[in-house]
Amino acid sequence: MMAIDRTAFAVGVRLGLGPAAAAFVLALSFGAGAEARGWGITLPILFSALAFSGSAQFTLLTALSGGSVGAAVASAALINARYLVMSVALNDSLQGSRLSRALQAQALVDASFVFAHRNDGRYDVSRLIGASLPQWVLWVLGTAVGALTAPSADLMHRLGLDVVFPAFFLALAVDEVRRSRRALAASLLGAGIAGVLLLVTDPGYALLGSTAAALIGLLPHRGSDPDPETAETGEETL
């Protein structure tokens, strides 16, 4: 059984409040959209509580409206393929038995993955869990409020609430690329790949293709191991 570091957990909770607020706004839209498509109130709430994946949930909701169940599931799986890469990176930081490690991995979401990253390349699982907790609570709560009140898409757009989540993740990306030249190179390459693919395919496939830029991380570092100052600041060369 994993021992939770209370200090790291508390730090995670504090860091998670920002994306949790953004998740609440996005969940409002999901709950309203699901209710408008005949899902009712209970099903969207249960879906958010169990799936806890905004990208997959919106993809499934949209795909089910215009295609088969198989196509919807395939689209959601493609969107969430990034978690395969993230879980491999997180694996060595998990602790305890297989069951304990599996439960810890349930806290893996985009923002928490960034917050839990340490300069030594490993991840603080206590911080990961702490950051995910408020996000899960407000994601489920936002879905419930959206399904119950069903605000219109036009109202969400006029208030600018539909861009809150993308803007937040842009801020996370900016903070991450400032740590490393390699991360900056991967981000620019990924953006370029996505831009080209958007000309010929759907956004979901463009997003998936852009993750190929992460292969930059497999390139060997120049020279020897980074000095302590570089390791502490997170700066590195390609």
Image (cartoon, helix red, strand yellow):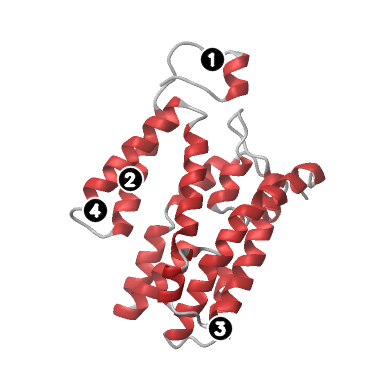
- Residue drawn at the location 54% of the way across and 15% of the way down: 226
What's the CA distance linking mark 4 and mark 3?
34 Å
- Residue drawn at the location 37% of the way across and 44% of the way down: 211
- Marks 3 and 2, the one that precedes in the sequence: 3
Kindly identify which residue carries mark 4. Answer: 198
Q: Is residue 160 above or below residue 29?
A: above
What's the CA distance linking mark 1 and mark 2?
28 Å
Residue 168: x and y in percent read: 51, 51
Closer to us: mark 1 or mark 2? 2
Kindly identify which residue carries mark 2. Answer: 210
Where is residue 140, by image quadrant?
bottom right
Q: Which mark is residue 149?
A: 3
Closer to us: mark 4 or mark 1? 4
Residue 134: x and y in percent read: 68, 59
Where is residue 72, by image quadrant?
bottom left
For the residues labelled 4 and 3, say whether their Cβ atoms are less than 8 Å apart: no
Q: Is residue 185 above or below residue 42?
A: above
